């Protein structure tokens, strides 16, 4: 059964009801709480988790400088760690850098 969130201003509580059989309000300790959709779906910023160091598209540590200069020549300046892993600033930067190298991520949505 799904969990639904209810709030009365400052306080948020959770209640479990059958799917689509939840009330609009609940009573808890003598107070009335209304369903709070924003508490059920917390906001995650689109930039959360970036920058990332990508091990999968990395190279040997001896080739880190070569990868850095190659990507700069292709118009996608990218920081490369001492271990040879590129550090992508955001999803767009990652997509451009992978394309410049002729790589494609089958698990991504682009």
Image: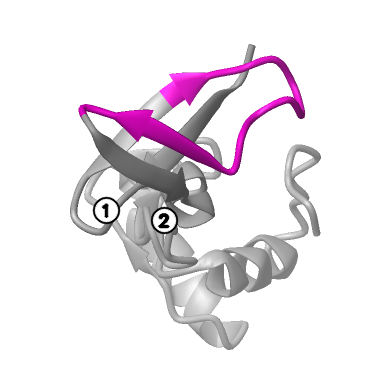
**Disc 2 to disc 1, C-alpha distance:** 6 Å
**Dominant SS in magenta:** loop
Quick check: 27 above or below 58?
Answer: above
Callout 2: helix, strand or loop?
A: strand
The mark found on residue 98 in the picture is: none
Mark 2 or mark 1, earlier in chain:
1
Q: Nearer the viewer, residue 28 or 57?
A: 28
Question: Residue 43: horizontal and vertical position, in percent?
Answer: 44, 58
Q: Is 107 displayed left or right of 3 in the figure?
A: right
Pointer 1: residues within 10 angstroms few (<14), some, or many (20+)?
Answer: some
Q: Is residue 23 magenta?
A: yes
In which quadrant of the rendered view does residue 26 lie?
Answer: top left
Residue 99 percent coordinates (x, y): 74, 66
Residue wearing tag 2: 86
Q: Count the numbered circles shown.
A: 2
Q: Is residue 15 visible?
A: yes
Quadrant, the N terminus = top right
**Residue 77 forms part of the magenta stretch:** no
State if disc 1 and disc 2 touch (CB < 8 Å).
yes
Image height check: is 26 above or below 79? above
State the image quarter where residue 64 is shown.
Answer: bottom left
Residue under the point 74% across and 21% down: 19
Q: Which residue carries the number 1 mark?
A: 81
Toward the viewer: 100 or 38?
Answer: 38
Q: Quadrant of residue 21?
A: top right
For residue 8, side relative to residue 3 (left or right): left
Q: In the rendered view, does 42 fall on the left or right side of 51?
A: right
Instruction: From this view, report whether residue 9 is shown above or below residue 39.
Output: below
Front-most of residues 33 and 49? 33
Q: Which residues are magenta?
A: 15-29
Q: How is the image coloured?
A: one colour
Name which residue lies at 35% across and 61% down: 51
């Amino acid at each position: 059964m799904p969990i639904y969130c209810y709030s009365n201003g400052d306080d948020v509580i959770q209640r479990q009801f059958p799917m689509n059989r939840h009330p609009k309000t609940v009573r808890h300790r003598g107070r009335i709480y209304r369903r709070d959709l924003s508490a059920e779906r917390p906001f995650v910023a689109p930039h959360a988790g970036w920058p990332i160091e990508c091990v999968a598209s990395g190279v040997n540590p001896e080739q880190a400088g070569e990868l850095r200069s190659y990507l700069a020549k292709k118009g996608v300046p990218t920081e490369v760690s001492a271990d040879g892993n590129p550090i992508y600033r955001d999803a767009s930067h990652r997509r451009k850098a992978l394309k410049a190298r002729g790589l494609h991520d089958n698990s991504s949505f682009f």
